[in-house]
Image: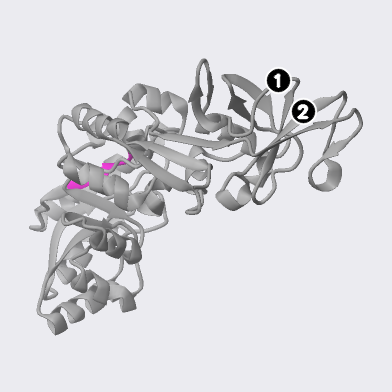
Amino acid sequence: MRPTQALIDTNKLRNNYHTIKKVTNNAEVTAIVKANSYGHGMVECAGVLQSEGCRFFGVAIPEEAIKLRQGGIKTDILVVYPVLPDQAYYFCKFDIQASLSNIEFAEELSNMCGKLSNKVKCHLFINTGMNRDGIQPEEAVDYMNYVSRLPGLDIIGCFTHFATSSSDLDFAREQLNIFNNTLESLKIAGHHFQWIHSANTGAIAYLPESHFNMVRPGIALYGGGPDIETAKMLNVEPILTLKSKIILLRRIKEGESVGYDRMFRANKPMTIATVPIGYGDGYLKILTGKSRCIIGGKSFEIAGSVCMDEIMVNIEDSEFQIGDEVIMIGKQKKEEITIYELAEKAGTIPYEITTALSPRILSIYKP
């Protein structure tokens, strides 16, 4: 068994879900499990959440929804982004809920419902300032007047998406105001929705007036946030520990180099440990010369370039053995490496750190 593993604490996943329920006054949760549950295992995490009573799951593409169905998820699944009209078949075939952002897809979805003699539940997507997906607010009433008459479409929800819910609350409130005004216009026109939702992780933490009767947590379910302050405010815990083991030890002399392009040179005699994890596993190459790991409860710098399959670690004069555990993300004794630390060093966001993790890392789900 390959020693490079992702340990997923399913008990913490359960706790995070119920914490979010409590924070949002028991609003319905659409658990966002797209991108392999942000690198934590989509089918496995969804199965745990379904067992805890989660009734809705959100994905980015129909293929993810199909994988959930094939993995035993029986509850509602919403594809939150628009797709091409030729993908309408999958929504009918696999009982997948659709978001509506244009006429073309809605018409083809209705046609497909007619061919297969069934209905598809849909959610109207309102663009309130993200300017990525959704119907323009001023077009919402006319759009609903049209699509609500299309056979086979059961439009049960209305939603929007925030661009700055953890970074610029003034703009987020502008978006929320536009959304509320659009909802009122739709109501006056006779359109009512079972589910209203807008709050992503940041809005769950900082914008309680956006919770409505449904929220859409993503990274918070896995114990993270767009920043560490948001995670702390929500009181969620990381569910991931990324670890490996030492597979080789060698002593090198002062002046010797380590790895590709000789990017590391020893300034004194030292021991180098080889660990089987690299950018082929999603441990970003840009972390070369910037990151560290934990061995025996102590922090050690990675020496030289992050390779595709391995890293080398300067353990100085420490006496470790082949097979000793190496922590890449997580805690060991008093030391901890967080996704926020890695994101800062890589010049990216914490979401990329976990979603980059490769399927060739063995995931172990701890009850």
Judge the density around disc 1: few (<14), some (14-19), many (≥20) Cα neighbours within 10 Å. Answer: few
Residue 122, by quadrant, is bottom left
SS for tag 1?
A: loop
Badge 2 vs badge 1, beta-carbon distance below 8 Å:
yes
**x 35%, y 68%: residue:** 83
Query: Which of the pair 23/236 is nearer the observer?
Result: 236
Q: Is residue 93 above or below residue 281?
A: below
Would you identify the image quadrant in which residue 325 lies? top right
Q: Position of residue 345 (x, y in %)?
A: 63, 33
Q: Which residue is mark 1?
A: 318
| Residue holding disc 2 | 271
Give residue 149's position: percent from left, percent from top. Answer: 11, 72
Q: Main secondary structure of the magenta part?
A: strand
Which region is colored magenta?
Answer: 196-200
Q: Is residue 294 left or right of residue 103?
A: right
Cα gap from disc 2 to disc 1, whole angstroms: 8 Å
Residue 8 sits above or below residue 156 on the image: above
The answer to which image quadrant residue 23 occupies is top left
